[in-house]
Image (spheres, coloured by chain):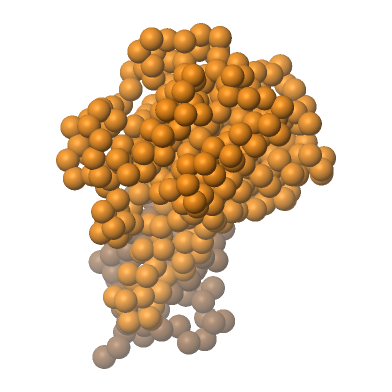
């Protein structure tokens, strides 16, 4: 899980071009949106594509989104639970 | 009605940002692509916003902010931009991803930022400006069309000031494609010697020049914008001369009243023949200089020319870097440019 979260932080920075922060500055449980990293709805779409491209995981139920993308840990847990066999 | 150029902001292949006129030390290039000298954008734009901006958007936004800062205006009444090719880099990224990913899993950012009006929109978003916002995309007339719209808005008095700019960028995609048409010279020793040995082709350029136009004086204005005119594909030199003379007549002046002609000569022997012919006839008695050796050729290069002319009018003299024998007491400048002999434009600026 720790390795997955470390990878995710690098991928989030790369995908969203967050030049002003480093992976170490993103907490595992830090909120990604609004008060945390300050991401917005466009970033949410970028993260959905990231999951598809990097982990071959599609979020079919839109209502799951806020929960899945609430933090790096929640993303890692979702990936672990839904990784294709 | 008098239209005042209150402030300017210009990012170009010369060191022009924050400068009222051309710096003494010109930037020299030995390539056929003149890229802009870009500032540290993080000092001008919020880093959280920069991350989604491609180069052209950063250039445009930074030049616009510099212009407003100089004017001391936080929020203009209207924002108008002119661009021929728009946000090419993001367009290229988006199209490439469409091909690579077989039209699936496309990320939204490049698509959202690829439209021509993104620069004007980003400026408005940043300033929270809800006023009139428009972008003109008319190839070699893009900046001039934006100017005409600004003039009409100011003359209608629906606004009292307008932030207006011309922006275009070079990308590897665009340069590769336009090079196939033979538009650019192969070997360049120096952009500053562009006119010394006429040959086929020119040098590619880019830039973002913004202006705050006002229908009231501000005590710190650069110049008056007296008029703008465009004409399309003139049949011959006589038609070109006729357009220029009509434009001057509309201003109740003649060539004798022009202190300096700023020409869009670009080093291409075919296109420059138009300027050569005019120099022997209509411009025979005029002081003439050029600007495309400084910024390269691109469809909205006249925005750079307007910046240069406004600076000359404000200082009253042609910079030594532009003309070896400096000329003082410049009160009225005619800018004449043609883009690939198709889009011809005229601009007249004078002292306030």
Q: Is residue B111 above or below residue B293?
A: below
In front: B108, or B34?
A: B34
Residue drawn at (33%, 22%) of the image: B26
In front: B83, or B347?
A: B347
Picture quarter containing residue B155? Answer: top right
Residue B36 in view in this figure: no
Residue drawn at (58%, 24%) of the image: B255
Residue B107 in view in this figure: yes
Whole-percent x, y for residue B5 in the image = 64, 28
Chain seen in brown? A
Q: Quadrant of the C terminus of chain B?
A: top right
**Residue B92 relative to residue A60: left or right:** left
Q: Is residue B210 above or below residue B308?
A: below
Q: Quadrant of the N terminus of chain B?
A: top right
Residue drawn at (49%, 60%) of the image: B113
**Residue B78 relative to residue B116: left or right:** right
Residue drawn at (42%, 70%) of the image: B107
Q: Is residue B299 above or below residue B223?
A: below
**Residue B210 relative to residue B149: left or right:** left
Chain seen in orange? B
In front: B334, or B310?
A: B334
Whole-percent x, y for residue B284 in the image = 46, 23
Whole-percent x, y for residue B306 in the image = 54, 32
How many marks on residues?
Answer: 0
């Amino acid at each position: 899980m720790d390795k997955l979260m470390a990878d995710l932080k690098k991928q989030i920075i790369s995908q969203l071009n967050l030049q002003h922060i480093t992976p170490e500055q993103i907490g595992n449980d830090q909120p990604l949106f609004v008060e945390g990293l300050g991401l917005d709805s466009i970033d949410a779409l970028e993260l959905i594509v990231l999951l598809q491209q990097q982990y071959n995981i599609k979020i079919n139920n839109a209502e799951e989104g806020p929960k899945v993308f609430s933090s790096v840990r929640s993303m890692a847990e979702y990936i672990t639970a839904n990784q294709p066999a | 009605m008098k239209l005042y150029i209150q402030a300017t902001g210009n990012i170009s292949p010369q060191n022009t940002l924050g400068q009222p006129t051309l710096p003494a030390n010109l930037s020299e290039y030995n390539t056929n692509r003149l890229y802009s000298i870009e500032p540290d954008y993080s000092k001008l734009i919020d880093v959280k916003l920069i991350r989604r901006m491609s180069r052209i958007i950063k250039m445009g936004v930074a030049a616009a902010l510099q212009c407003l800062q100089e004017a001391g205006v936080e929020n203009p009444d209207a924002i108008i931009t002119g661009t021929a090719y728009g946000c090419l880099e993001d367009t290229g990224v988006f199209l490439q991803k469409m091909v690579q990913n077989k039209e699936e899993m496309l990320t939204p950012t490049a698509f959202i930022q690829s439209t021509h009006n993104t620069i004007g929109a980003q400026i408005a978003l940043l300033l929270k400006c809800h006023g009139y916002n428009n972008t003109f995309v008319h190839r070699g007339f893009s900046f001039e069309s934006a100017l005409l719209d600004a003039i009409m808005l100011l003359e209608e008095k629906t606004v009292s000031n307008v932030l207006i700019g011309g922006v275009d960028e070079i990308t590897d995609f665009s340069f590769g494609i336009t090079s196939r048409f033979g538009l650019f010279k192969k070997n360049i020793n120096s952009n500053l010697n562009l006119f010394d040995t006429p040959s086929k082709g020119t040098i590619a350029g880019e830039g973002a020049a913004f202006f705050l136009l006002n229908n009231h004086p501000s005590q710190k204005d650069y110049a008056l914008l007296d008029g703008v005119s465009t004409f399309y594909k003139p049949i011959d030199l006589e038609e070109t001369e006729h357009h220029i003379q009509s434009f001057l007549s509309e201003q109740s002046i003649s060539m004798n009243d022009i202190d300096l002609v700023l020409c869009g000569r670009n080093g291409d022997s075919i296109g420059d023949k138009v300027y050569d012919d005019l120099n022997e006839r209509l411009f025979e008695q005029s002081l003439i200089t050029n600007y495309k050796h400084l910024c390269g050729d691109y469809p909205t290069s006249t925005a750079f020319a307007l910046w240069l002319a406004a600076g000359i009018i404000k200082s009253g003299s042609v910079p030594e870097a532009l003309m070896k024998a400096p000329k003082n007491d410049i009160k009225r400048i005619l800018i004449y440019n043609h883009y690939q002999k198709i889009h011809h434009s005229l601009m007249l600026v004078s002292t306030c």
